[in-house]
Image (cartoon, rainbow, N blue to C red):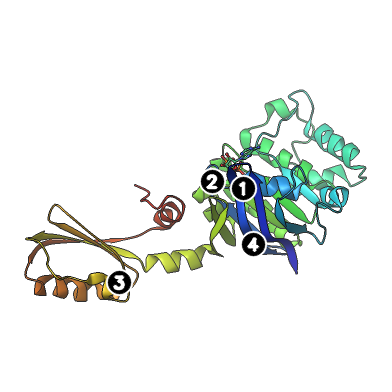
Amino acid sequence: MTAIETSNLTKQYSEETALDDFTLRVERGEVFGFLGPNGAGKSTTIDIFLDFIRPTDGHAVLADCDPQQSPQKVKQNIGVVPDDYSLYDSLTGIEHIELAKDLHGSDEDTDTLLSRVGLADAGDQPAGSYSKGMAQRLAFGMALVGDPDVLILDEPSGGIDPNGVQDMREIIRSEAESGTTIFFSTHILEQVEAVCDRVAIINDGQLVAVDTISGLRDAFNKQSVLTLSIDGTPIELNLTDLDGVTDVEYTDETLTVQLSDPQLKSTVITQVEASGVSVSNIEIEEASLADLFSRLTTGGDSK
Ligand SMILES: Nc1ncnc2c1ncn2[C@@H]1O[C@H](COP(=O)(O)OP(=O)(O)OP(=O)(O)O)[C@@H](O)[C@H]1O
């Protein structure tokens, strides 16, 4: 069952195209990473989900509701852990959950909500005494009030507390298993790698990749870079004619060849030598997921 769907979503701000024909589908119960560099269009997408802004074209559907047509219903069905969530130092965990319940008109059991986020024993303590990880859990617990179908984690600025990554992963997993869809927006690759089933990579308002983390890794691990130090200038060398060579660069007697098929390394070396130059050194670099993200979003290298 689809939890979130965007169809040809477009948002134009005079000169700036914040979202460009953006189509995406997230299934119910997925922990979905929404990954993109600053300015990619993540906040614009979430603002459309929450009907804070309206698209220029296309539409979104969340938990079977169109935010433009049923904004209140969508808000009831969505929980958000905002980037800049703030807690009241003097209020306890219990009081924070009670506050969120009042706002939602909910009569859920406060202790159960606190247990779901691992704060059963800390509900009586003031939030000012909480560690960063505990504060994140409380913000998460407040977002769970009303039993949302979709939970949006909007660019947690400090990231998920490194000490609490495992805890948060378990909480996120257990919410997903109970049917909640988690939409985790961030510009930090490691955050989605740690918790998400699938990721979409957005850049310049466009979807550039969507796959499982392992699918992306497999696809990109096949990519490698061959750097050859050569003596002389290769003439009549058409490596890009080879199926599996994606890019060739030649500078200062160094030939850099990007390969999508690692099996081609020896063929490339043979062809270079056949072109009349000698190869004095060979370096092989297998690319990482971070390189993939960097290449998809900047056209460059992560280093
Ligand atoms: N109100 C606005 N008026 C004009 N341009 C805007 C407006 N809001 C966003 N933009 C532009 O739209 C593009 C997408 O911005 P958006 O805030 O959605 O990116 P983002 O991926 O959330 O970035 P970040 O990670 O920095 O929050 C950017 O180029 C931004 O400058």
N-term-proximal mark, 3 vs 2 = 2
Residue where numbered disc 4 is placed:
23
Residue with the most extreme top position: 90
C-beta proximity under 8 Å, tags 1 and 2:
yes
Residue where numbered disc 1 is placed:
42
Q: Which secondary structure, mark 2?
A: loop
Residue where numbered disc 3 is placed:
262
Ligand 1 has an atom within 8 Å of the beta carbon of the residue at disc 1:
yes
Ligand 1 has an atom within 8 Å of the beta carbon of the residue at disc 4:
no
N-term-proximal mark, 1 vs 2 = 1
Residue in the foreground of this view, choosing between 247 and 295: 247
Compute the Cα span from label 1 to label 3: 34 Å
What x and y, as percent, mark residue 1? 75, 69
Q: Is residue 236 above or below residue 198?
A: below
C-beta proximity under 8 Å, tags 1 and 3:
no
Q: Amino acid at mark 3?
A: Pro
Viewer-side label of 4, 1: 4
Residue where numbered disc 2 is placed:
187
Which residue is at 46% across, 52% downward?
297
N-term-proximal mark, 4 vs 2 = 4
Viewer-side label of 4, 3: 4
Residue in the foreground of this view, choosing between 268 and 104: 268
Q: Is residue 35 above or below residue 244?
A: above
Compute the Cα span from label 3 to label 2: 29 Å
Compute the Cα span from label 4 to label 2: 19 Å
Residue in the foreground of this view, choosing between 198 and 120: 198
Whether residue 196 is visible, yes or no, is yes
